[in-house]
Image (spheres, coloured by chain):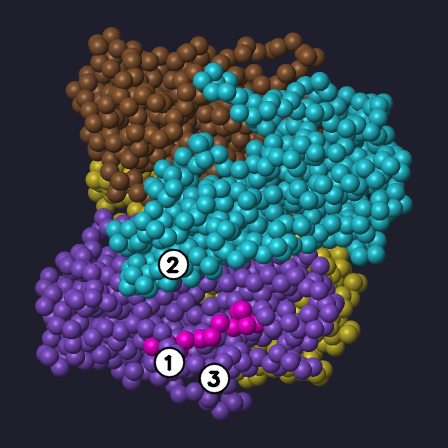
Chain colours: A purple, B cyan, C brown, D yellow
Amino acid sequence: MDITTLGEARFPSPQRRTVSDQARVPSRLIHDPSTAAATEDWQFELAGPRERLFFDPTQTRAGIVTCGGLCPGLNNVIRSLFLELHYGYGVKDVLGFRGGYQGLDPVRGLEPFILTPTFVHAIHKDGGTVLGTSRGPVDIGLAVDNLIQRGINILFTVGGDGTQRGGHALFKEAQRRGHPLAVVGIPKTIDNDVAFVSRTFGYLTAVEEAARVLHCAHTEAHSVHNGIALVKLMGRHAGFIAAGATVASQDVNFTLIPEIPLHLDGEQGFLTALKRRILQRAHALVVVAEGAGQDLLASTQDSDASGNAKLQDIGPFLRARIEQYFQAEQIPVTLRYFDPSYLIRSVPADAEDSILCDFFARNAVHAAMAGKTGLVIGLLHDSFIHVPIDLLVSQKKRLDLNGPGWRAVLAATGQHLD
Amino acid sequence: MDITTLGEARFPSPQRRTVSDQARVPSRLIHDPSTAAATEDWQFELAGPRERLFFDPTQTRAGIVTCGGLCPGLNNVIRSLFLELHYGYGVKDVLGFRGGYQGLDPVRGLEPFILTPTFVHAIHKDGGTVLGTSRGPVDIGLAVDNLIQRGINILFTVGGDGTQRGGHALFKEAQRRGHPLAVVGIPKTIDNDVAFVSRTFGYLTAVEEAARVLHCAHTEAHSVHNGIALVKLMGRHAGFIAAGATVASQDVNFTLIPEIPLHLDGEQGFLTALKRRILQRAHALVVVAEGAGQDLLASTQDSDASGNAKLQDIGPFLRARIEQYFQAEQIPVTLRYFDPSYLIRSVPADAEDSILCDFFARNAVHAAMAGKTGLVIGLLHDSFIHVPIDLLVSQKKRLDLNGPGWRAVLAATGQHLD
Amino acid sequence: MDITTLGEARFPSPQRRTVSDQARVPSRLIHDPSTAAATEDWQFELAGPRERLFFDPTQTRAGIVTCGGLCPGLNNVIRSLFLELHYGYGVKDVLGFRGGYQGLDPVRGLEPFILTPTFVHAIHKDGGTVLGTSRGPVDIGLAVDNLIQRGINILFTVGGDGTQRGGHALFKEAQRRGHPLAVVGIPKTIDNDVAFVSRTFGYLTAVEEAARVLHCAHTEAHSVHNGIALVKLMGRHAGFIAAGATVASQDVNFTLIPEIPLHLDGEQGFLTALKRRILQRAHALVVVAEGAGQDLLASTQDSDASGNAKLQDIGPFLRARIEQYFQAEQIPVTLRYFDPSYLIRSVPADAEDSILCDFFARNAVHAAMAGKTGLVIGLLHDSFIHVPIDLLVSQKKRLDLNGPGWRAVLAATGQHLD
Amino acid sequence: MDITTLGEARFPSPQRRTVSDQARVPSRLIHDPSTAAATEDWQFELAGPRERLFFDPTQTRAGIVTCGGLCPGLNNVIRSLFLELHYGYGVKDVLGFRGGYQGLDPVRGLEPFILTPTFVHAIHKDGGTVLGTSRGPVDIGLAVDNLIQRGINILFTVGGDGTQRGGHALFKEAQRRGHPLAVVGIPKTIDNDVAFVSRTFGYLTAVEEAARVLHCAHTEAHSVHNGIALVKLMGRHAGFIAAGATVASQDVNFTLIPEIPLHLDGEQGFLTALKRRILQRAHALVVVAEGAGQDLLASTQDSDASGNAKLQDIGPFLRARIEQYFQAEQIPVTLRYFDPSYLIRSVPADAEDSILCDFFARNAVHAAMAGKTGLVIGLLHDSFIHVPIDLLVSQKKRLDLNGPGWRAVLAATGQHLD
């Protein structure tokens, strides 16, 4: 599946070293004659500067928009996008659209502003996003009107699946109208659950902060007799943050993730296992990803402004169930509940995520200047790649329960639940 | 009001430099002819090593107990108590009672253990308490039986008002039975609300961590349009943590404390002021101490195991009221609520608190070895002092609304609420 | 010794609550009948807003200058000075002089700039000084010409002794010329060695960072056989940082400070004591304040641009002596040398220092607006005071070798050197 | 090149999920028809638990040794090795050899000790190595005598190239004597310069700490007029730490690495470029890897105890040359020199490195239990692999000057030196 291009790349690139448009990165890496190939083998374009550009830098205006929840590194991405456009290619005007996709709508949004070297100078040292963000889609027609009127030829969309789908619709509509618009996405999910992106920016910082929280929770649990600390971490559909923080911390006794159905009751259930732990060691640390155990909760059809299904809150539910259980068992426990998500996602990117953001952003600029569109930058086997949005949104990344990551969680916790 | 002593101090001290038993620190410092003296002028003994000891170190056994909620520095205090007893005076046996006052009760508690240099070596680098803790009193008779049976002559009680009152009762009961028992308290309140202690250990660390949380909350608030971050901080009866974190952060717009009645409604009320802020600046950061606005909540007569009146939770109450208000005003806002108390109180002591803990602990040992009892170590005008427990529990420390601390909060927030 | 005032304070203050000009804070606090009074008893004005002002805020221009080495909190001071002038009093123009005292000299200095709320908004989150700094004096005549020409009536000087003496000279010269100029100093010394200031801003942050370094140094020392870590810390004339970090860390074995002559050789000397430690425990952590052992070094008459006597570098000297000694003793050791001063002094202020800076700065503004001059803001027994510069520079603060601070160092290290 | 095995794996594995011995990971990933294949294509065994074991866990004793300089994560590796052996396989005795390879020599070394769950419980939260370390080789004959006498069948060697070569020699000698000894290495190089290991443990933590240092250095540089901060970072033969910290920080102006010859003089030289920067911006931040510019220094033939060629110290050399140059140019500058290596390498592993250490260690145990020897655990394209030591030591990893890493450095610094 190759990437859509706007047309022939005719302008010379100012970049000294470039990457061939023919270079391919395969999705399937390990050769194992003992097993049948389980997954299709995709071939991805290697990201990087191209020899020839579709856009003439001197005639090009770019825009940047950040959507959805906060994630460490948003400002790094904005900054590196701007700097690569400005210094790397000589693009003069880069507009920051404000408040997420609302900012593309001239009625609902605030006026965008021109980014400058002075403005972006130190923004990467702060969490959050200087452009602001919001949830929810934008009226495609109004947004494309706006982009055309402002002469925008390149739009960088930093956000999750919904954002990227929206970006794709913007490109299609612009194409329909004959306006050359390259839309290049930078995948943003603190949960790290995007296909063809082995590590999304912000994820490592989140694991670092989550591990700090686990350290505090462990201290609370073991400083009182029969202390239980219950920590809800991010992870709507995948347990990567919960798993990563568990392995980093090595203090967790139970890690509950969306990929594994949660059984509370019965001899093999979580509550009995927790009782065993408390009776043996008099304290326990439990991590639950926010998407775990959703089938246990009263189902609703709600979804948030971004179209994500609204999760019921597993944290207070599990807290109540644990307290009821031990009360019924007449075992006095002290339960402390932690819900640190906003404290985790609002910090600045750590060093590794800062580096990652820089790579994602600069590669996005290279792709856009070459006239590529309808793609996001991916990361596979340590190589940055171009991932068609159609392919991206058709696949999901989940923790491989037979893989080394989950094996490390089982070794760290010693949990026997399933 | 002088300190109770167990009897004549007859043994020579191994300490090279000592402090006179006659040295006094006055509570009243500032001389202001323009005002009548508002407060009684107490004269406190200066803490420090005494020339002569009541207890023969070679014949003395000491015990340590930590009570109530976690507070940064508990392990530092335990460690310095032990080291001063062991190396400073040559006391051979120091027992760690486990699980708070429950550990003094041989029926309910776990067996205490002998502290050693190896055991305490690095404990000050961890949060929590290696002795464990619990809330609630102990049966005085059973506890004194236990102390006598174990030959304990000195007991260090690390805890709040209730703990210190309990310690005093232990001394009285031991005295009634003719057992020489020195009970010396180290005041522990992360809220910093103890009279005659200008700064309790753990308070500065709590302010540091709270300021970190405010930084995150500020990021959340200003990254979305009309973002409101509401942070509940510790402070049952006094707003010291809320005030300190506000002045350190300089990002807070409203700081609500127990010392000032909370008026939500009306033109002068908090909600109107918050609306003004949102309309002007499109984001706001609100700090509420847990004891603020208690009169607004349905009153109950409950108290926890330590006998503290149970507070209703102002956080979710205020969150709901803010959301209702803006809904009624038809102003869409995004509210993020933060409840970081367990994350704040479970961290290790920072450098300044580590130093403070060392001073508190070693002065407690000096007092006890000299046969002083019924006191806690205080800190007044930068000097460590002996505070009779009777006096301690008769006074409360609150934020002075006419003093420089609150003035600094008003300057930092610009709030005009009262 | 009262403070110089420029004249009658005639303008009403906008501050709601004020402090009496008659309130006094005594320097001597502890009453000890067993000793003769060792020190003179000074009475200081209490700092704070005054009821009446000498300067009409609407007609007043103020300037700020930061001098000498970096210190955590400089930007907090600048920011709070500006905010109190701007919002607290309504002073319209506040000039930031750039590059230290050089910035007062129109020939050598860069053009000063007008501070604004936007400019200072987040500067307190950064280390260093946004105004820049330099060492060395300024030509008093040229500077006063400049101040008069620019209509400056209030100058805030943030710096050490030399800076404050310079500020006093500026006031005197302006007075001679009939120009009403209030010069109010904020004492800046990371070493914490200024009389009548119990804690200078930046000191606690420095201790915190120094304790971090000691933790690393301890790790290096005990991870190899006969590992010695030697850490040079700040402290030209006083060992406060070395002592504070030692007590916070509890891992140090020897703390060498300027207040105690350093004897390297002989049975009672440092090297023999270090050998004993190495033979017993196979690792050691040594802290040396930069001003320790200066008499052992070849003396020179040099001084730096600020007029401070240039110290010889005790660090490499001691490192070489230790290595020579153990080589001669045929004991193989691995020595790691740490010189972290620039890493310590360049970080942002921690929470407590941030609060301290705010108090120092706002009190400086209150003093200046009341027409007081020739003073610095001091801090005594937890109260902020006005200290005449003449008095300030006539006294030195040193570690009291008979006091609790040094006693805590001896207890933490177990060192027996003197 | 396949891995050496001690013999037929006959014992059943207690591990639930295993990895095929036939699974292969190729070294060459990207397919680029536009270029000739530049590198040989190695096929590596995939690491992970095997279905059958060579060693009977109940009859097996293992040993662990850590060698060379400190690196964040050493204790994590020790801990996970022990836990996987103990809980994962049921190996009863795991010996910790002390003080590096010296500890294998019964004459020179300290007695090894038996690791226990209690001992290793929290060691991963500390920097350094609880086993101690040293540089230099061990007498192979004596060491194998010792291993045989102690009944050691598995030895884990945590260290650099020299350590791994030594481990290989131990295996060969044991084989010669008919003693089945599996030697499995975990590559340790904070410099990240080992072939077939895309990221060595400790590297990311080092980049994080180095970025902190760069932040301080930047503050020092821009707070004075013509301030130059020169920071020496680790990197004997490869500039990975310098490059990573530069991209993370985004504040660096010049990054000098071993892979690029350093030209100081001339119009294209570093000093002229630095002068341009100073004249334009009045401050500069320079990073130099310790191995850069070695040809400029007086060459010697020295090597350290580990056999590494001793580097001359580029830091003070460059500092002196910069000062001389600006003196000659009559441009006054203030130069601050930073040498933070010991502060960087002695901290605990961050979350990502903690995870990495766990993977390296557990995979090493899996390999050893299966009877594999003469290998180290590698990491390629996000997969853990078995790398024959012969191959490992025949290749070097260097920064690819045509790759995205160095391109990111050039974009971040804007340097034009080569």
Residue A26 tag number? 1
Labels 3 and 1: the sequence-earlier one? 1
Q: Check if residue A308 falls in the magenta segment.
A: yes
| Pointer 1 local density, CA inside 10 Å: few below 14, some 14–19, many at least 20 | some
Quadrant of res C268: top right
Vertical position of residue C357 compared to residue D69: above or below: above
Question: In the drawing, what numbered circle is on residue C77?
Answer: none
- As drawn, the label of residue A31 is 3
Q: In which quarter of the image is the C terminus of chain B?
A: top left
Could you tell me which secondary element the residue under label 3 belongs to?
loop
Disc number lying in front (2 or 3): 2
Looking at the rendering, which quadrant does residue B363 occupy? Answer: top right
Q: Is residue B167 visible?
A: yes
Give x and y (percent) for residue B95: 80, 45
Residue bearing mark 2 = B322
Q: Quadrant of residue B360?
A: top right
Residue at 61% from the left image edge and 18% from the top image edge: C30
Marks 3 and 1 in Cβ contact (< 8 Å):
no
Residue drawn at (65%, 43%) of the image: B160
Question: Residue at image x 43%, y 65%?
Answer: A203
Q: Give the range drawn in magenta.
A: A307-318
Local secondary structure at mark 2:
helix
Residue C405 percent coordinates (x, y) = 62, 27
The chain containing the residue under callout 1 comes to: A
Q: Along the line of sight, which residue is nearer the eye, A349 or A2?
A: A349
Horizontal placement of B220 versus D329: left or right?
Answer: right
Residue A177, placed above or below residue A97: below
